Image (tube, helix red, strand yellow):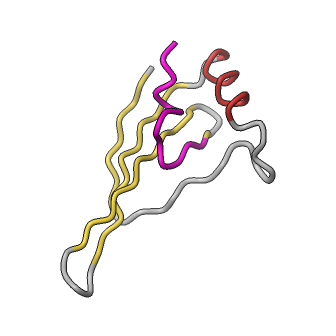
């Protein structure tokens, strides 16, 4: 099993159906404006992926599920 949802991601969190990997990019448009762009990849939750997720984030103190980083713009891709 590849652990792409855990490797070198800026943020990883999960919902009831998906484990989501977020890659966050900051775009400077000019001196006063910038955008936060997220590339979100949604991995369908499976028992194997859940186990890998829980093993990796077992030390999260507040919420093992994590939270999404809000952004101005996002791109989504779904992996089943």
Which residue sits furthest top? 1
* Residue 38 appears left or right of 8: left
The x and y percentages for residue 18 are: 56, 33
Q: Is residue 3 magenta?
A: yes
Picture quadrant of residue 77: top left
* Residue 47 appears left or right of 38: right
The answer to which of 76 and 36 lies nearer the viewer is 36
Q: Does the magenta stretch include residue 7?
A: yes
Question: Where is 12 relative to 33, above or below?
Answer: above
Q: Name the main secondary structure of what is drawn in magenta.
A: loop
Which residue: 45% across, 46% down? 22
Which residue: 72% across, 28% down? 55
The x and y percentages for residue 15 are: 62, 40
* Residue 35 appears left or right of 57: left
Which residue sits furthest left? 30
Which residue sits furthest front? 8
* Residue 66 appears left or right of 63: left
The x and y percentages for residue 8 are: 46, 39
The x and y percentages for residue 9 are: 47, 42
Which residue: 32% across, 47% down? 75
Q: What stretch is highlighted in magenta?
A: 1-13
Which residue: 67% across, 16% down? 47
């Amino acid at each position: 099993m590849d652990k792409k949802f855990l490797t070198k991601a800026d943020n990883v969190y999960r919902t009831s159906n998906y484990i989501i990997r977020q890659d966050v990019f900051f775009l400077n448009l000019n001196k006063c404006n910038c955008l936060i762009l997220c590339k979100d990849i949604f991995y369908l939750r499976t028992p194997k992926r859940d186990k890998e997720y829980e093993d990796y984030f077992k030390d999260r103190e507040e919420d093992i599920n994590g939270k999404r980083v809000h952004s101005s713009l996002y791109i989504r891709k779904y992996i089943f």
